[in-house]
Image: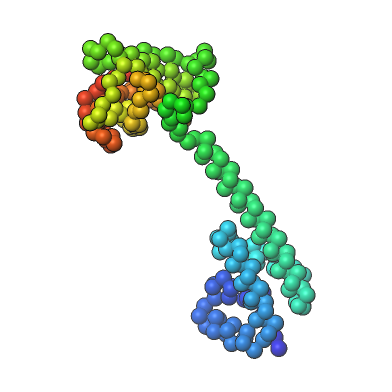
Amino acid sequence: MKHLTEDILVDYVLGSLHSEQIKNVNKHVLICEECRERVSLWQQLTAKESELIPSKELQQRIMATIDSQPKSKKKKHQFYYIVASTAVTIFLASILVFVNQSSHDLTESKEEYITAQHNLIPEQSFLNRPETNRLDIFPVSLDKNIKGDVWLNEATNELIFQVDGLEPLTAHDYQVWLIHEDNVWKDELLQFENGRVQVYYKGPDVGTIRFIKVSVEPIGGSHTPTGPETLFIDLHQ
């Protein structure tokens, strides 16, 4: 009995054959135990790897491996050799995909934004660096009890905002807004600790922050500033 070629079996497993060809393969594997076994092996192999490598690429890799084999008459032991070598090829490709994805994730993690308050703020070693700028905070109101500072370092992409003298609110929240040059807003609800507000921010866009302001907002905060401003800082002053 003439057996089906490997490329036909691979196309069959990957669903790349026309309907008439699929019918012919179905009929053949019903009466040919060897081809039926080969189909089963290809199905097991591709099922394990299909989630890591797109099917078209998987098919190309499989066919490339088959084409690299000697053109002599295919015997059963040769088929197992092809399957094994193809499995190794796909396994190595899967590792490469995983490494590339991990590298991509690591690169993205370096650009993550970090916001923290009070005891959750990481070590503030950047405060003592010569390139760190310190700006005084002046309240919008005439309340002389409100005072604070902003430390900004564009080299390390870090910023600390610290304010003393804000009166705690019961029916509202204080919300800080970081306003960038392109009018992109980032916000954070302020938390009090011993009468002090302290916010740490780190992100690749620190250098584009133009203004920092604090406003009085409904409990839970707002998507955009709606209440009266308490503080307003121009970082380019």
- Which quadrant is home to the C terminus? top left
Q: Residue at x 32, y 18 (%)?
A: 233
Can residue 233 be seen here? Answer: yes
67 w.r.t. 171: above or below: below
Quadrant in the rendering for residue 133: top left
Quadrant in the rendering for residue 54: bottom right
Can residue 234 be seen here? Answer: no
Viewer-proximal residue among 1 and 236 = 236
Q: Residue at x 60, y 51 (%)?
A: 98
**Outermost residue, top side:** 144
Viewer-proximal residue among 104 and 145 = 145
233 w.r.t. 66: above or below: above
- Which quadrant is home to the N terminus? bottom right
Residue 130 image offset from top left, x and y in percent: 52, 13
Q: Residue at x 34, y 17 (%)?
A: 164
Quadrant in the rendering for residue 232: top left
181 w.r.t. 55: above or below: above
Viewer-proximal residue among 149 and 15 = 149
Residue 66 image offset from top left, x and y in percent: 70, 68
Residue 58 image offset from top left, x and y in percent: 60, 63
Residue 67 image offset from top left, x and y in percent: 70, 67
Q: Is residue 24 left or right of residue 232?
A: right
Q: Residue at x 54, y 73 (%)?
A: 15
